[in-house]
Amino acid sequence: MADYEYDVLIIGSGPGGYVAAIRAAQLGLKTACVESRETLGGTCLNVGCIPSKALLHGSELFDEAANGTLAKFGVKTGKVEIDVATFQSEKAAAVKDLTGGIAFLFKKNKVDWLKGHATFKDTHTIEVDGAAHTAKNIVIATGSSVTPLPGVEVDNEKGVIVDSTGGLALPAVPKTMVVIGGGVIGLELGSVWRRLGAKVIVVEFLDQLLPGMDGDVRKEAAKIFAKQGMELRLSTKVTGASVRGKTATLTLEPAAGGASETLKADCVLVSIGRRPNTEGLGLDAIGLELNKRGQIETDHSFRTKVDGVWAIGDVIPGPMLAHKAEDEGIAVAENIAGQVGIVNHAVIPSVVYTMPEIAGVGLTEEAARESLKASGGEIKVGKFPMLANSRAKTNRETDGFVKVIADAATDRVLGVWAIATVAGTMIAEAALGMEFGATSEDIAYTCHAHPTHSEAIKEAAMAVRGKPIHM
Ligand code: FAD
Ligand code: NAD
């Protein structure tokens, strides 16, 4: 049998790759992780989840002080101003802490960090900046990058037309920001700069925001964002852009076609999705083909069609989420070690970290109805407004609702959706319940602490088959 330098070599150190590396090392496998960035942690820690959450948090603090929320509770602040340099440096500190934390964990677990860009030479050999490394198993965890929009050229240095990386690093609050794409990134980053004073206009191709989410949630979210002052231009497409000095001029058209108009802004954020990173990986050398969406297909164990080569995270099908990548990282390492690593892709929560937060797990109402249609089955839906939740009322945070969708025949929960200030934290309970095969009755008869926002989940579950108490 051939001798290899490593049992497992992972390409990419994002939430998929670094977690796979640590788990593989914990399981006694000799492990290396290749990363072309200066720091570990991938998109998520460097230019994604972590910096965006730091800016969201900072802008929420500013908003609470500036919009009268603090004053309403008697907290006097005087003149409220934002120092963008400090705001940005606090974000940078969080990124430094967390990426440094991964480097510490690699050392602690004896994972070798190979610095540079990896290219396949053959199924068991990778070249990293001229040096060859061999491994019995190679895991592709190369993640994703911003999808470009033809005719709208991103230049993060100039800072007029930016992608999410540029949008996280603006040195000043724009007067007007046009967000192209009313998805997760557009709404999170749009919220940050709106709270700090920008006029934000969201241009979305579809007739609703947040594709893939529950229909009621999408409608309610649009109402809430409009109430907060975002201008929503739905069913509209951007057909071109030009930049003169510090101003961009966009050409817009109805999505279905029609008369065009122009829109000027001092910042344009392009956030129309992300695409898998496979360029320059040398997949031809191992005969690994991509699917129509440019993704690497795997089986349930995360094996690709090429023996000894595995793939996880944003580069394979499924939602592009850090926790999905992490769970796949653990599973792939366990499978390589001869254990049984499984990810239940039917129960992956998703959260939009706006204020209020928007979260869901399992099927939307539309998908649940459709999935039972073939067998003649039906669903039952229970809804409970945050306006009737005592904690939300006390905190003066009454926007939103919780919705529980169950199979009418078995009562098994098929999906849970929530808009609430802490919906991202609340949804963990729903995911755990669904993982254990909970019925709506199980949730309705589980004692929930009072007063908490989570009581709204219990009440929505009560509404599936009977009546909630507080409505
Ligand atoms: P990535 O994190 O993309 O990591 C892949 C790594 O591989 C990169 O560091 C890259 O440099 C490296 N690499 C690629 N090719 C090579 C090569 N050939 N050689 C060496 N190294 C290579 N998800 C959430 O769940 N919650 C959030 O709040 C959230 N917020 C986000 C905010 C923003 C602005 C963005 C852009 C994304 C956000 N995401 C969020 C999505 C999340 O970042 C991704 O789903 C996650 O990072 C995917 O992990 P991954 O390991 O598959 O890949
Ligand atoms: P997205 O897929 O969430 O949203 C893109 C939006 O752009 C969609 O609504 C789409 O209809 C619209 N769009 C596409 N082409 C358009 C065009 N030409 N003109 C106008 N609108 C157009 O993508 P994103 O917001 O760029 O985020 C990328 C990925 O990053 C997502 O898959 C998401 O899962 C992940 N992410 C997750 C989080 C989180 O978990 N909180 C945060 C940020 C990013």
Image: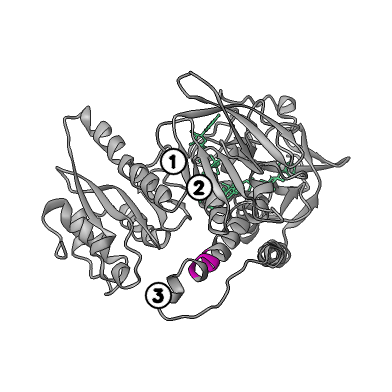
Considering every residue shown, the one lying at the far left of the view is 466
Q: Nearer the viewer, residue 26 or 107?
A: 107
What residue lies at 22% left-to-right and 52% top-to-bottom?
383
Q: x, y percentage for residue 299?
A: 50, 34
Q: Earlier in the sequence, mark 1 or mark 2?
A: 2
- Secondary structure beneath label 2: helix
**In this figure, which residue is indicated by the disc labeled 3?**
72
Label 2, on which residue?
A: 187
Residue 169 vs residue 427: left or right?
right
Q: How many marks?
A: 3
Boundaries of the magenta span: 60-64
Foreground of the two, 60 or 78: 78
Q: Which residue is mark 1?
A: 210
Q: Vertical placement of 78 versus 446: above or below?
A: below
Q: Position of residue 323 (x, y in %)?
A: 51, 52
**Does the image show residue 143?**
no
